[in-house]
């Protein structure tokens, strides 16, 4: 019996030797973009290697634990990386290609992967194709919103069902922070959350006109607390 074929990963790219930091601010920005593009390409190699490592594991379930130990990261973070690596190399080939070209990094790629996680492979590839034309100039939040719109169009029934289920799971969380603060966070239907924020914002702006000793964010926070209490 012949030995199983081992897929050939792309050659590891040689890092360019960047000269000294440019003196002009526009030059510095260009250098930052150049370096970021190389970081993006290296991350593409990382996720391809991780996907291959996962495919060749005798016990795939143990891979996140192995990765967490090897890279000194949390097991949950390792689990997310394994999922992203598998999606990029199977369901999101154009997103992976954008990383190889230096256009996006792994964090942005995750914002495309996460909304597609519950789609079929074919549906995910359709979203991937749509998003390949929407990458330019978008920050991570913009990419996720654009991906959600593509998912809603390609899988309307499934998306509507997930929206209903998400409303059923609505909750409020109290999250401890440092320096004597906490974060009070609630998952709300979009129309409710937007209306609530608009009410808080209107009152905060009205108060800001009279009281400049507090920032607009401080006024919003105070109005939020007062309405709840």
Image (cartoon, grey):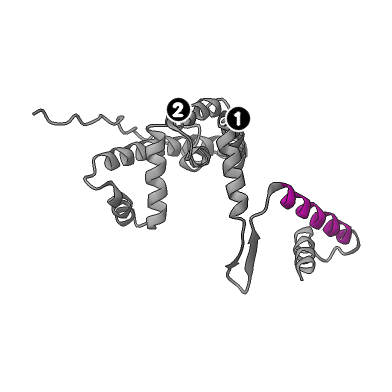
User: In the rendered view of the protein, which quadrant contains the N terminus?
Assistant: top left
Residue occupied by mark 1: 153
SS at badge 1:
helix
Residue furthest to the right in view is 210
Q: Which mark is residue 138?
A: none
From what the image shows, is residue 202 above or below residue 130?
below
Q: Is residue 203 a member of the stretch shown in magenta?
A: yes
Which residue sits at x=30%, y=50%?
A: 61
Residue 158 coordinates in the image, percent (x, y): 55, 37
Q: Which residues are magenta?
A: 191-208
- Label 2: few (<14), some (14–19) or many (≥20) C-alpha neighbours in 10 Å: few
Q: Earlier in the sequence, mark 2 or mark 1?
A: 2
Q: Is residue 214 a member of the stretch shown in magenta?
A: no
From what the image shows, is residue 171 above or below residue 63?
below
Residue occupied by mark 2: 122
- Label 1: few (<14), some (14–19) or many (≥20) C-alpha neighbours in 10 Å: few
Residue furthest to the bottom in view is 180
């Amino acid at each position: 019996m012949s030995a199983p074929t081992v897929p050939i990963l792309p050659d590891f790219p040689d890092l360019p030797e960047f000269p000294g930091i440019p003196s002009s601010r526009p030059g510095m920005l260009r250098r930052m973009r150049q370096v970021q593009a190389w970081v993006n390409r290296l991350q593409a190699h990382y996720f391809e290697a991780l996907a291959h490592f996962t495919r060749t594991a005798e016990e795939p379930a143990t891979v996140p634990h192995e990765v967490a130990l090897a890279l000194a990261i949390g097991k949950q973070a390792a689990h997310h990386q394994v999922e992203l690596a598998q999606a990029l190399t199977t369901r999101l080939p154009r997103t992976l290609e954008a990383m190889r070209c230096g256009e996006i990094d792994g964090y942005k790629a995750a914002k495309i992967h996460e909304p597609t996680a519950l789609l079929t492979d074919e549906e995910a590839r359709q979203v991937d194709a749509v998003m390949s034309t929407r990458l330019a100039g978008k920050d991570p939040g913009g990419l996720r919103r654009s991906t959600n719109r593509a998912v809603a169009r390609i899988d309307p029934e499934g998306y509507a069902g997930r929206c209903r289920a998400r409303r059923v799971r609505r909750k409020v969380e109290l999250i401890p922070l440092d320096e004597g603060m906490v974060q009070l966070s609630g998952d709300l239907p979009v129309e409710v959350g937007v209306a609530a924020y608009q009410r808080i914002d209107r009152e905060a702006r009205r108060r800001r006109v009279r009281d400049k000793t507090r920032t607009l964010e401080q006024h919003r926070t105070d109005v939020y607390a007062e309405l709840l209490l």
